[in-house]
């Protein structure tokens, strides 16, 4: 798995780390939650630009870590979703979780399935952050679009 980044990094390596994290979340087991949630929180702290984090909440690192340490991984993961982001979380009868996230300014939801709700949420957030925003030339189309609805 990718090591936690300790400083602001180049956009390409940051996006590569998001890709690695999303894949890790989809294939991880419940005992990996803490490591992966902390890794995602670290990536947020070292984003190449604050503008990339629209729709993402950045809870205090100590409080976030305490939640994860106390076994409240789902609450910790939910605390990463900003008020202006949309999300949907479900679980099938076999216990697999599915999270869908849509960030403001994006036109498509990001969906990830995982063994736990926390892993699914963090994986979907990582995928959603990697999805590029529309280019300024495409912004005139935004006014004409119907708001996205999670299904």
Image (tube, rainbow, N blue to C red):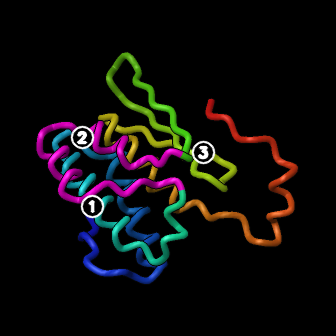
**Residue beneath disc 2:** 73
Q: Residue at x 19, y 44 (%)?
A: 67
Q: Nearer the viewer, residue 140 or 62?
A: 62
From the viewer's perspective, is 150 left or right of 148?
A: left
Q: Residues within 10 Å of mark 2 (few under 14, many from 20)?
A: many
Asked whether disc 3 touches disc 1, contact meaning CB atoms under 8 Å apart, the reply is: no
Label number found at residue 83: none
Image-quadrant location for residue 77: top left
Estimate the spatial distance between the alpha carbons at disc 3 and disc 1, rounded to whole Å. Answer: 22 Å
**Of helix, strand and loop, which one carries label 2?**
helix
Work out which quarter of the rendered image holds the N terminus and state it.
Answer: bottom left
- From the top left corner, tell me how far across and down residue 103 is, in percent: 57, 51
From the viewer's perspective, is 116 left or right of 88?
A: left
Q: Residue at x 46, y 42 (%)?
A: 112
Residue 142, compared with residue 117, is above or below; it is: below
Label number found at residue 39: 1
From the viewer's perspective, is 84 left or right of 4?
A: right
- From the top left corner, tell me how far across and down residue 24 is, in percent: 32, 53
Q: Residues within 10 Å of mark 3 (few under 14, many from 20)?
A: many
- From the top left corner, tell me how far across and down residue 102 is, in percent: 58, 46
Label number found at residue 109: 3
Q: Which residues are magenta?
A: 55-83
Q: Residue at x 12, y 46 (%)?
A: 69
């Amino acid at each position: 798995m990718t090591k936690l980044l300790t400083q602001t990094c180049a956009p390409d390596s940051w996006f590569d780390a998001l890709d690695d994290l999303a894949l890790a979340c989809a294939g991880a087991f419940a005992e990996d939650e803490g490591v992966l949630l902390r890794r995602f929180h670290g990536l947020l702290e070292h984003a190449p630009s604050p503008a990339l984090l629209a729709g993402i909440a950045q809870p205090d690192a100590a409080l976030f870590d305490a939640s994860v340490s106390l076994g409240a991984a789902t609450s910790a993961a939910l605390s990463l979703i900003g008020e202006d982001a949309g999300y949907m979380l479900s679980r099938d009868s076999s216990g697999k979780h599915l999270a869908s996230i849509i960030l403001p300014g994006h036109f498509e939801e990001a969906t990830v399935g995982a063994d736990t709700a926390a892993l699914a949420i963090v994986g979907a957030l990582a995928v959603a952050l990697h999805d590029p925003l529309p280019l300024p030339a495409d912004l005139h189309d935004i006014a004409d679009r119907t708001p996205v609805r999670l299904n």
